[in-house]
Amino acid sequence: MTPRTDLAGYLVRYPQEAGLGDEDAATVLDRYHTPDYELVNDGVRLDRKRLLDHIRPARKRAAGLRVEVEQALVDGDQVAARYRLIAELRKGGTITTEIYMFGELAADGRLRRAIQATRTIPSE
């Protein structure tokens, strides 16, 4: 499974595996992304090292993660998605983030680049 073959599946599985899994975070990242993967999230550029630095402490904060995909589109090497990430925190509370993502795929179907705009919305 790659983002090309199942974008919605990737959007659901990747946060689960990266944020809650026991597997090495670098292995999870490499499964879905190219070595030169770059994420620009709300104007902040995250390369592979910065993503891994973000994933490791997130595993300590999250008690649960759920993704609700509204739209997921693949057209050639381009992807677009609109979805919500709902994080239940170990210290209590829930954070719901609405995400608008546009990306570029590599020839092997993994993500090469993604740009996201996010906003926190009230949790139900």
Image (spheres, rainbow, N blue to C red):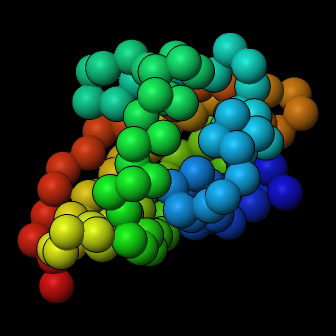
Q: Is residue 56 above or below residue 11?
A: above
Q: Residue furthest bottom?
A: 124
Kindly tell me whether residue 123 is visible in this rendering: yes
Kindly tell me whether residue 32 is visible in this rendering: no
Q: Position of residue 9 (x, y in %)?
A: 68, 66
Query: Is 35 on the left or on the right of 54, as rendered?
Result: right
Q: Position of residue 106 (x, y in %)?
A: 79, 27
Q: Is residue 82 above or below residue 70?
A: above
* The C terminus: image quadrant: bottom left
Q: Position of residue 6 (x, y in %)?
A: 75, 60
Query: Is 14 on the left or on the right of 110, as rendered?
Result: left
Q: How many marks?
A: 0
Towards the viewer: 8 or 123: 123
Residue at 41 percent of width and 73 percent of height = 64
Query: Is 118 on the left or on the right of 104, as rendered?
Result: left
Q: Quadrant of residue 7?
A: bottom right
Residue at 36 percent of width and 63 percent of height = 62
Q: Position of residue 96 (x, y in %)?
A: 24, 66
Towards the viewer: 17 or 8: 17
Residue at 27 percent of width and 21 percent of height = 43
Q: Is residue 106 above or below residue 96?
A: above
Q: Residue furthest right?
A: 108
* The N terminus: image quadrant: bottom right
Q: Quadrant of residue 98?
A: bottom left
Q: Is residue 35 above or below residue 93?
A: above
Residue at 50 percent of width and 55 percent of height = 19
